[in-house]
Image: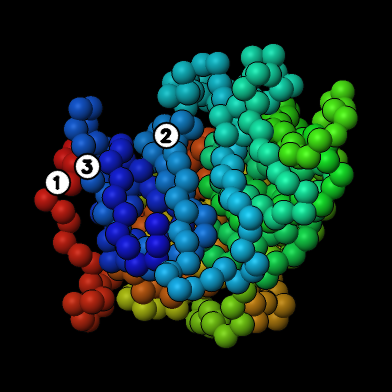
Amino acid sequence: MFISCCFYLIIQENCRHGVRQRRNPWSDGAEYITQCPIRPGKRYTYKFHLTTEEGTIWWHAHSGWARATVHGMIIVYPIHGAHYPFPKPYSEVPIILGEWWKKDVMEIPGNANKTGGEPLLSDAYTINGQPGDLYPCSKQDTFKITVEQGKTYLLRIVSAVMDENLFFSIAKHKLILLGTYGCYTKPFKTDHIMITPGQSMDVLLQANQPPSLYYMAARSYSSTFGAHFDTTTTTAIVQYRQSYDPTPLPFFPRLPPFNATRRSTEFTRQLRSLATEEHPSKEDFPINPPRKFDYTGKKLPENLLVPEFGTRVVVLEYNAGVELILQGTNVLASDNHPIHLHGYSFYVVGWGFGNFDPIKDPLRYNLVDPPEETTVGIPNNGWVALRFRADNPGVWLMHCHLERHQSWGMGMVFIVKDGATPRTKMVRPPSDLPEC
């Protein structure tokens, strides 16, 4: 696939993660937001243009918990005649991180809502559909990649995991992060990546170690004290093509501990946009928090524990400059929330721990090379500051990408008004748009 071509998918209602969907929310795939569900036995063709995206993005179902198994990768290559902003790799390897349950995944959110408890934890994480050879059921089918010493490989990584952030690493190998969500970043070396549900990352692997077998592995990063989470580890194997004496077991990576917030923060702090000239606008977001309190305090008013029903919508004028502060809270329990915005990418100009200070914190914004993202993790008991230009008319969902939180209603909608010209207005809905 190349930039500026048109891409077609025939599948149940789904979302293309990281695609701007210019003027076309009808192909965004958000159930009951921009379309009704596709009925059994029916079909709907999603049509969208890829214009500014380049790199690894993905699509997934947006109906209940169907995205646990209904998802896939989309690779957008440089336009004909253009080149990567890094040396061309010898080969590319797609890697999709996922979860596996023994139970019917579509029944999990309903059962949790009936009891008021947490959804059932997954039984395993997976790399390209396999838990790895730590599990007898997967030992023969563990995903393997074969590399040649001295060659460089581009790993295209997507986290289709439902409810947990993951640390990912390869034994004895440094990783070079190149991009996220179809946007390139300033490259940097790292021992591991921390990837949230809904994120995609482009990573270089240099096969520069002695020929042998090496594990790639992933496991949870959980920042919520006392919370239950899947503590399993998924593995795949990197094997060198050259001859060597096989070791009893592949070398295993030193993954950070489950609660290693410092290691997660060190990784996130290094993300920088590749661009040096494009900067976000400075207009303030025009809406204040509807209820002010000590968001990250240890003793919070009990009435904050009572949920409210409602549809949260913010209407934006076309081409308005938007600054959005996402503040984590300690209501019930703090958590690291991966927040995804449909229809847009945004600049992460700032983030920190504790309560956002509207006087001091903006002075530390990165307005030189902020990373461009479509999903961002709000630090545990912290905040992030985002900026974007509301230049894509339509109805766009913003939600937590922890599936249990989305099931509980952690989402809202931006309605961006039409502009003044035909090219700045939302396109008409297609004739085959599903009906409710």
Q: Residue at x 78, y 40 (%)?
A: 242
Q: Position of residue 203 (x, y in %)?
A: 66, 55
Depth order, front residue of 289/273? 273
What is the C-alpha distance between the residues marked 1 and 3? 7 Å
Residue 434 position by quadrant: top left
Q: Are marks 1 and 3 in contact (CB under 8 Å)?
A: yes
Q: Work out whether 298 lies above or below 161.
A: below
- Tag 3: residue type? Tyr
Q: Position of residue 316 (x, y in %)?
A: 36, 71
Q: Which mark is residue 432?
A: 1
Residue 63 position by quadrant: top left
- Tag 2: residue type? Val
Q: Residue at x 65, y 62 (%)?
A: 178
Q: Choose the circle earlier in sequence order: 1 or 3.
A: 3
Depth order, front residue of 68/172? 172
Q: Residue at x 23, y 46 (%)?
A: 45
Depth order, front residue of 251/183? 251
What is the C-alpha distance between the residues marked 3 and 2? 15 Å
- Tag 1: residue type? Asp
Dot 2 lies on which element? loop
Q: Residue at x 20, y 27 (%)?
A: 41
Residue 19 located left or right of residue 216: left
Residue that badge 2 annotates: 70
Residue that badge 3 annotates: 44
User: Farthest residue toward the front?
Assistant: 243
Dot 3 lies on which element? loop
Q: Are marks 3 and 2 in contact (CB under 8 Å)?
A: no
User: Farthest residue toward the bottom?
Assistant: 277
Q: Choose the circle earlier in sequence order: 3 or 2.
A: 3
Instruction: Give the class, few, some or many, for how many residues have Cα within 10 Å of label 1's Cα (few <14, many ≥20).
Output: few
Image quadrant in which the C terminus is located: top left
What is the C-alpha distance between the residues marked 1 and 2? 22 Å
